[in-house]
Image: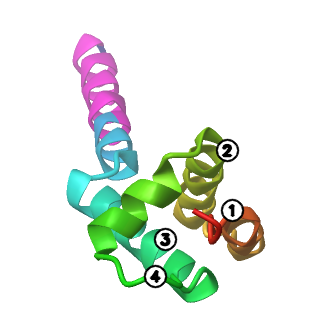
Amino acid sequence: MKFAHLFCLVVCLLVAAFVHAEDEESPAKDAQIKQQVMKDLKKVCTPQKKQSDKQWQTMILSSEANQLLIKNAITAMKRDNLDGYWDAVSQVDCMEDY
């Protein structure tokens, strides 16, 4: 009887560990999502000046409001919430006057 209880406990722990491991995001996937957000932002906010992608990204991320909106867009993409994603992306200040 003790063996059956121990076996059930081990199975439950293994299942919980497996589910937890699947839920964790890999750094590569996070980087890919951020890259996709920045690509979509560039479509929405076409830069007026000739500047590198790095300079443009630094300019966009210089605003705390934009940082929050981009984090919201990343979270929405992870949750497959396309409406929330495009809502956050469309609210980003393109900073065209800078």
Q: Residue at x 55, y 86 (%)?
A: 46
Amino acid type for the residue under numbered disc 3: Val
In the visual, does 47 lie left or right of 96?
Answer: left
Amino acid type for the residue under numbered disc 4: Lys
Q: The residue tagged with tag 4: helix, strand or loop?
A: loop
Q: Compared with residue 37, is residue 4 higher up or lower down, i.e. above or below?
A: above
Pointer 3 local density, CA inside 10 Å: few below 14, some 14–19, many at least 20? many
In the visual, does 94 lie left or right of 23?
Answer: right
Mark 2 and mark 4: Cα distance apart in space: 22 Å
Disc sitting over residue 49 in the figure: 4
Asked if residue 5 is among those painted magenta in the image, a careful observer would answer yes
Which image quarter is the N terminus in?
Answer: top left
Q: The residue tagged with tag 1: helix, strand or loop?
A: loop
Residue at mark 2: 65
- Indicate which disc, 3 or 2, sits on the residue closer to the N terminus: 3
Q: Compared with residue 5, is residue 62 higher up or lower down, i.e. above or below?
A: below
Pointer 2 local density, CA inside 10 Å: few below 14, some 14–19, many at least 20? some
Q: Position of residue 59 (x, y in %)?
A: 46, 57
Q: Position of residue 22 (x, y in %)?
A: 33, 52
Residue at mark 3: 37
- Indicate which disc, 2 or 1, sits on the residue closer to the N terminus: 2
Residue at mark 1: 93
In this picture, which residue range is highlighted in magenta?
2-16
Mark 1 and mark 3: Cα distance apart in space: 14 Å
Q: Tell me which corner region of the image, top left, top right, bottom left or bottom right, holds residue 92.
A: bottom right
Q: Residue at x 25, y 27 (%)?
A: 10
Q: The residue tagged with tag 3: helix, strand or loop?
A: helix
Mark 4 and mark 3: Cα distance apart in space: 20 Å
Amino acid type for the residue under numbered disc 2: Ala
Pointer 4 local density, CA inside 10 Å: few below 14, some 14–19, many at least 20? few
